[in-house]
Amino acid sequence: MSSTTKRGWFIFLMLAFPLAHFLVFFVYININTIVMAFQKLNYFQNTVEFAGLRNFEQIFTDMKRSPLLGKAIVNSLLFIPVTNGILLPLSIISSYILFKKVYLHQWFRAIFFFPSILSIVILTMVFSFMFDSTFGVFNDILQVLGLEGWQRTWFGDKHTAMPMVFVYCIWAGIGFNVILLNSAITRIPQEVIEYGQLEGVPMWRELSQVVVPMIWPTVTTVFVLGSTSAFTIFLQPQLLTGGGPNGSSYTIALYVLEQVKAGQLEYAAAVGVFFSVIGIAVVMGFKLVLERIGSNVEY
Amino acid sequence: MKKWAILLVAAVMAFTMAACSGNNEEGDGNSETEQVLKIAYFNGGYGDEWLKGWVAAFEAAHPGVKVEIEGDPGITEKMGPRLESGANLPDLAFVLRTNWQRWGIMGYLADLTDVYESTIDNGKTFKEKLQPGAADYGLIRDKYWVAPWTDGATGFVYNAGMFEEHGWKVPETMAELEQLLPSIKEKGIAPFAWGGKVMAYWDFPTVGWWAQYEGAEGVEAYKEMASPDVYGQEGRLKALEQFYELLADPSNSISGAEGMDHIQSQMAFVQGKAAIIPNGAWLENEMRTSLPEGFRMKMMQLPAIDGAKDAKVNNTQGGDFAIIPAKAKNVELAKEFLKFTASDDMLKLFTEKTGSVRPFVYDAASVSGLSEFSQSVIDIWQNSRNVYLFSQNPIYYSKYYDWPLAGAPYMMIYMEDETPESAFQGNLQFAKENWEKTKADLGIE
């Protein structure tokens, strides 16, 4: 066997598994889902039939009649400003603070990274214990501060359940973002930073006019990932609130999951396809806008 | 060196792919004579002692058979994908109530008609031994696809020690229960523990009130689902109104109930923070490790709603079931196991290990060593009109269930986003408007 053939075999073997994985778990699954979205099960003829757009019609019917889907859409869309308007700036500031090696920066690093290495089940459990209405430390703190009027059933109150999911996502998500952003900041050429320091540039200006522009591609990536979560997030509300109370903390992905559990597979597939198309358009739109705003810095 | 590296990579890949394929070949057993029966089961409120007891008895009666069990609290959700893919299939599975009809129609399940027709003991067939209300649960188009697994009593469980200590009479009507509430609160105890994350637990008393109000005929008419008017039965509205009457006053509930799950609310109940909890026959078994020393509880006969046609009703909440996948490795052996578990001895063993019952006609009360709670459950189950709320109409089991508009409205009513009247009317209106379209969608002529 020639060395070229051997090399070819080696490349083939190395690619075979990921390719097979991609074909089965991405291509096949997604094509199957798209096909299913246009089908319905005939309970009397024992057949799966072509349903045209009826499953998609049902989405619009449910939007009008069922408060659940409407709440799920609003909550999911709110993830975009929460992840990009609150979590992303917090992550950038945190990354910058770690980069500047402020006092106790190593301790902060551990605090930020800690949630990223724990299972979401453990994290949500710890978080729900903190805010538990009967034995949670947060309500106790409010009591000590004389703010009993602020105490509530944080995950059981329709006004606070979804905000609590957002707070959890910020608390648990900041570590992952900081990992990405911090590594981008540390790659900024030292002379650029030093030049600014020699010019006496204050920290906030260094952050906004030097660091952020220099790491803009990474910021764009984090922004896009954060926007994507609006259409994919389900475990967090499922584990924290179960989507309740009264559906007030449902998300689109959790709605799809519940439809699957209820055996409405074709409808669930249609909802998934419908919101995927919207999600792709929204996320790609954001990406194009961000790429135009900032330059693709190379160094 | 390169050759060895390639061989190593290939071996790793082959091993990984084999592991992912999840085929059932491993179930063939270690020797030529040994048969391995794989059983998956919902590992939850009933624990696993009942299944281990059955397995030990089955293996003793069937030399050469080894039974492997797989307990999983999430088995019900996982069963659909496993059946569809045909991978990693058990030979037999005990799962919670779900839309199994879809699995039957899609051809994923083995036909159990021969099991139903088999003689089990005392000259009775499997079907003849089943409770009348549960006998045709597994039937679609003249074939049986599932076997009923659990039965029981649901409604209100009360703290028996607390009731006796304070001299509270166990209420027989809802009027008596409502009169009792101030006395409970005077002692600094909340009348009810419940969890906002599991509002469906309010189905236990609410369905019972509806069945009390409508009587047996009304329940049967509902199950037929002949027209959308069944969603307009007055008993449905009365039951919702009764629910709201109990919970409208926040002091009737434990603090923070809205955010609790079933375990948290049950924990509050066994800790004596509440006197009553809407729950079912599995409660004692589920909380066994958390029961305080000397804690006593009982299930009460569901207090009768005002205007009840039939006061002694039990909402069994039956509907959990056993299936044999059509592609299972050992279909016949699994059928043998199912038949085996329907014998009087195995039915009593189930009661002994769970403190609850199966939907068969047998003398559950004769099981020795039952707790006070289990005895109350069996007493209610044996002396009430048991309601098995499932319909064989596809409109019910594939689309509408009991609340076609947006699921059970308990939390909406509790939070006063809806009134009992608006929730009732909304569901009726939806059923009327969509009935014909739903029939067409389902292929019903």
Image (cartoon, helix red, strand yellow):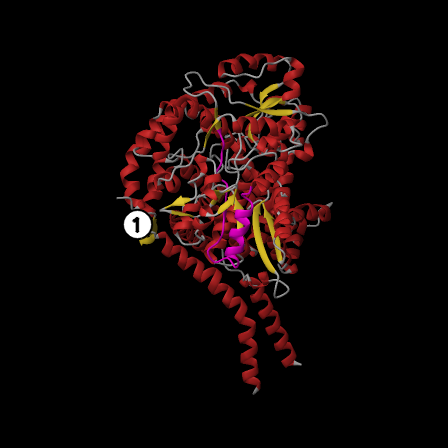
Task: Reply above or below: B275 against A175.
Answer: above
Q: Quadrant of the C terminus of chain B?
A: top left
Chain for disc number 1: A
Task: Reply above or below: B2 against B115.
Answer: below
Task: Reply above or below: B110 against B309.
Answer: below
Local secondary structure at mark 1: loop
Disc 1 target residue: A53
Kindly identify the residue that appears in the image at 56 percent across and 18 percent down.
B251
Residue B438 located left or right of residue B420: left
Q: Residue B138: give x, y in percent of width and height.
A: 43, 44
Kindly identify the residue that appears in the image at 56 percent across and 13 percent down.
B180
Residue B160 located left or right of residue B224: right
> Does residue A254 appear anywhere in the picture?
no
Q: Residue B163: give x, y in percent of width and height.
A: 63, 17
Q: Quadrant of the N terminus of chain B?
A: bottom right
> Does residue B41 appear anywhere in the picture?
yes
Of residue B340 and residue A208, the one placed in the foreground of this image is: B340
Q: Which amino acid, by three-letter code, is at mark 1?
A: Leu
Residue B305 image-quadrant placement: top left
Q: Is residue B212 magenta?
A: no
Q: Which range of residues does the magenta coloring cover?
A: B315-343
